């Protein structure tokens, strides 16, 4: 492209005014975001914004000065010591409003002092005010060098674009007499905290005056935005490069997105140097256009060059980011409102008197009793019982926990409740050390019976022998029941804590636990321990007594099973090994068969009595087993732990000890009230845009390898604009873009950010 043509093209770009790039709704949306930020919603919800990042002396402040027309402090060695939030707004009247937003870690007295710092002026020279702000923040070379406070500068004027930027302190590694290595860590932490926010657009400022590899900003940007979807690179001080040098070629290729690639591309800006610090804005812009009209820079697209096009690109990037992030911002606001209301509900109303404190406890006790009863009844319709964490959700559903715990306990009793597993002689032990054959166990019982012999007749047994055998057989019960007790208590306490944490604030919940729940639980634990001891006592040390007919059934079944097995054995011996499957014919007399079957009578009376005692013990074990698989007295006591009746019985001193409000609670309520108020205002202001704006894919502003232009068929129809100038200035009329007379798309107030060789014909259309 001829040099004069390139210069003319840059002039055309420079004539575009950022304030004309958005229609009324777009401007209103940007105003709402700025208003929300000024009201402090950014403390609770991350808002879309552009952050200006770079190494120290990379020219960041000069970028803001060029965009806004402000005059910053003119000391050449001055570095940004705090974040500067620059709000540009279009207004018929010009003016500058400056104030300080204190850091959250400031004490209240310092916060009030800094919030009182405000300045209104018409002049754009804010150097003296910035110095005053530094003093107010306590910045000097002897004490604090950097601050986490934010200087908010609102600039209004008829030629200002709608744009919000945050200029951050420059990154540095080595300390000097004015800034230490600790300061470097503080600055890096501050900058990264802004860059990490996923809704922040990173304007990564790279100085062509410094070695690119030594500058930290692009390394951090690529680490925190690996896809480059929210990073726009900005090359400053290109005039410091020697013409035709390798360095100049490197930075030109960088601007063409050929090296470090960002989806939003790169831009080039010539800064106002120290020698031209007194030049006017118009003179500065003229020098910039002259510079970009020569040399390798003419190979770049004109829309990548100069401050005017930078305003346009940044305005569009911010606008698109707001549109895309609006649904998630609304979701965050709604979530914050819901969580704030829940916390305020737990805190309750302010309660300075005992009567107010007692009413607070009444409310908590009613809610606690309702949820506790629902938990043990298995009624899980309340939202309290539905959480995203399955483990937390299950622990709140006490009926499910109890039922499953008791079922597991019953299985455990069947598997591990017997001290010895008595097996028939032909059954494999399977390596179980507790297993013993019936014949071996009979021999052990013989010894016990001899030592316990009374006046019983031969072939019978002392009934007390069953108690002794049973006591030894159910020895594991004590540990198993102890484990059940521990698990049940842990489950109940977990459910109680979850319910209490849901219906009361942390301090009141701690007071209720200390003065009401814990003493009551101590009584319940003691009662439960005694109850379980009462259940175990007759089985471990008492005389076996049961009125359950199941005992007789078990005893008869046990003996019938043994008789059946013995009869099969006798018949096999009588008829041969192939009985009953063999085809051989057997001849026998009925008497011989009867004699064979009757010969099974046990001649050893001791063996017979031992076997009968074992059968009775096993039958009694089964009858007693089910007595433990019950819902113990613990569960039904949970809703009675905290009742309105119990609150009535508390003394005034106890009520005050439990529900008296601390300074922490008062401060927390105040903070939550403020947060809720801010978020509700934000929801109201953002809600009206919810239906009007839909998310759109991020536009690629890289401008790589684009040299085409939108050509106008006639000057009177539409002004000629550079093809890559995003959203060129159109009126509030609809337009249709055509290629070879074929309509491509309809746009309202804007053109596509990037266009290839097309011919644009404006056709008036009725607005929908």
Image (cartoon, grey):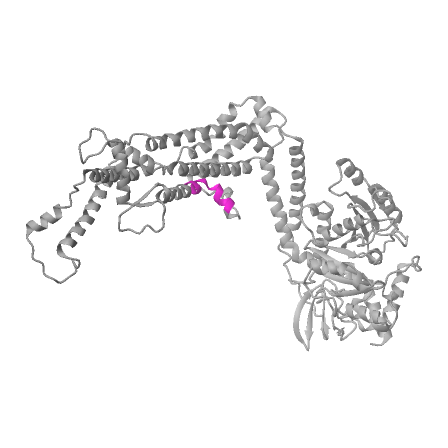
Image position, residue 306 (x, y; %): 82, 64
Which quarter of the figure is the C terminus placed in? Answer: bottom right
**Residue 721 appears in the rendering:** no
Among the 4 quarters of the image, the one containing residue 622: top left
Which quarter of the figure is the N terminus placed in? Answer: bottom right
Q: Is residue 757 magenta?
A: no
Q: Main secondary structure of the magenta part?
A: helix
Q: Is residue 395 magenta?
A: yes
| Magenta highlight range | 391-402
At 79% from the left edge and 63% from the top edge, which residue is drawn? 213
Locate residue 508 relative to residue 409 in the image: left or right.
right
**Residue 702 appears in the rendering:** yes
At 65% from the left edge and 41% from the top edge, which residue is drawn? 676
Residues 400 and 685: in front is: 400
Among the 4 quarters of the image, the one containing residue 7: bottom right
Among the 4 quarters of the image, the one containing residue 598: top left
Image position, residue 742 (x, y; %): 66, 75
At 59% from the left edge and 44% from the top edge, which residue is drawn? 338
Residues 384 and 98: in front is: 384
Image position, residue 383 (x, y; %): 51, 43
Locate residue 572 relative to residue 76 in the image: left or right.
left
Locate residue 257 relative to residue 383 in the image: left or right.
right
Image position of 425 with respect to 496: above or below: below
């Amino acid at each position: 492209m001829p040099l004069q043509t390139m210069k003319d093209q840059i002039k055309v770009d420079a004539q575009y005014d950022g304030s004309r790039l958005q229609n009324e709704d777009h401007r209103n949306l940007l105003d709402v975001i700025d208003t929300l930020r000024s009201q402090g919603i950014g403390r609770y919800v991350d808002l879309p914004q552009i952050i200006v990042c770079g190494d120290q002396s990379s020219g960041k402040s000069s970028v803001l000065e060029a965009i806004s027309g402000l005059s910053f402090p003119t000391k050449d060695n001055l570095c940004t010591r705090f974040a500067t939030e620059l709000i540009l707004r279009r207004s018929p009247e010009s003016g500058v409003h400056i104030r300080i937003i204190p850091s959250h870690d400031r004490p209240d007295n310092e916060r009030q002092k800094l919030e009182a710092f405000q300045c209104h002026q018409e002049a754009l020279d804010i150097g003296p005010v910035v110095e005053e702000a530094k003093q107010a923040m306590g910045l000097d070379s002897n004490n604090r060098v950097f601050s986490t406070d934010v200087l908010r500068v609102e600039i209004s004027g008829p030629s200002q674009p709608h744009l919000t930027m945050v200029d951050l302190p420059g990154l540095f590694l080595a300390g000097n007499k004015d800034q230490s290595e600790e300061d470097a860590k503080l600055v890096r932490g501050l900058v990264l905290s802004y860059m990490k926010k996923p809704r922040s657009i990173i304007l990564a400022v790279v100085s062509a005056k410094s070695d690119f590899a030594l500058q930290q900003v692009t390394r951090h940007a690529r680490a925190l935005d690996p896809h480059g979807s929210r990073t726009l690179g900005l090359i400053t001080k290109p005039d410091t490069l020697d013409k035709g040098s390798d360095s100049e070629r490197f930075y030109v290729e960088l601007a063409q997105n050929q090296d470090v690639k960002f989806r939003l591309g790169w831009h080039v800006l010539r800064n106002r140097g120290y020698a031209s610090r007194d030049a006017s804005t118009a003179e500065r812009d003229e020098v910039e256009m002259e510079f970009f009209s020569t040399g390798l820079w003419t190979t770049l697209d004109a829309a990548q060059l100069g401050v005017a096009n930078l305003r346009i690109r940044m305005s569009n990037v911010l606008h698109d980011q707001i549109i895309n992030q609006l649904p998630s911002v609304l979701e965050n606001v709604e979530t914050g409102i819901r969580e704030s209301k829940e916390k305020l509900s737990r805190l309750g109303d302010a309660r300075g008197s005992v009567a107010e404190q007692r009413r607070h406890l009444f409310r908590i006790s009613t809610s606690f009793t309702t949820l506790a009863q629902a938990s043990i009844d298995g009624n899980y319709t309340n939202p309290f019982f539905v959480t995203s964490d399955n483990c937390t959700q299950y622990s709140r559903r006490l009926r499910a926990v109890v039922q499953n715990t008791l079922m597991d306990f019953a299985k455990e009793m069947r598997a591990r409740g017997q001290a010895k597993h008595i097996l028939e002689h032909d059954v494999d032990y399977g390596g179980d050390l507790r297993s013993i054959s019936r014949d071996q166990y009979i021999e052990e019982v013989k010894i016990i019976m001899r030592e316990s012999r009374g006046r019983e007749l031969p072939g019978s047994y002392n009934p007390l022998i069953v108690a002794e055998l049973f006591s030894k057989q159910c020895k594991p019960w004590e540990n198993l029941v102890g484990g059940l007790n521990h698990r049940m208590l842990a489950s109940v306490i977990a459910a109680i804590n979850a319910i209490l944490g849901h219906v009361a604030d942390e301090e009141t919940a701690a007071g209720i636990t200390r003065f009401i729940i814990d003493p009551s639980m101590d009584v319940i634990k003691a009662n439960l321990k005694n109850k379980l001891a009462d259940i175990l006592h007759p089985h471990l040390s008492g005389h076996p007594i049961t009125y359950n007919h199941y005992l007789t059934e078990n005893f008869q079944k046990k003996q019938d099973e043994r008789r059946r097995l013995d009869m099969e054995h006798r018949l096999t011996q009588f008829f041969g090994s192939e009985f009953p499957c063999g085809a051989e014919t057997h001849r026998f007399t009925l008497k011989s068969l009867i004699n064979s079957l009757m010969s099974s009578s046990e001649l050893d009376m001791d063996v017979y009595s031992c076997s009968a005692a074992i059968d009775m013990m096993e039958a009694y074990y089964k009858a007693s087993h089910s007595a433990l698989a019950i819902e113990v007295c613990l569960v039904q006591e949970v809703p009675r732990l905290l009742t309105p009746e119990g609150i009535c019985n508390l003394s005034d001193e106890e009520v005050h000890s439990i529900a008296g409000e601390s300074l922490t609670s008062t401060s927390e309520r105040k903070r939550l009230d403020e947060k809720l108020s801010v978020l509700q205002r934000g929801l109201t202001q953002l809600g009206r845009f919810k239906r009007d704006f839909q998310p759109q894919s991020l536009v690629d502003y890289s401008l790589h390898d684009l040299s085409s232009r939108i050509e106008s068929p006639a000057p009177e129809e539409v002004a000629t604009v550079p093809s890559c100038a995003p959203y060129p200035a159109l009126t509030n009329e609809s337009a249709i873009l055509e290629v070879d007379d074929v309509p491509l798309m309809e746009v309202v107030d804007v053109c596509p950010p990037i266009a290839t060789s097309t011919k644009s014909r404006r056709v008036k259309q009725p607005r929908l």
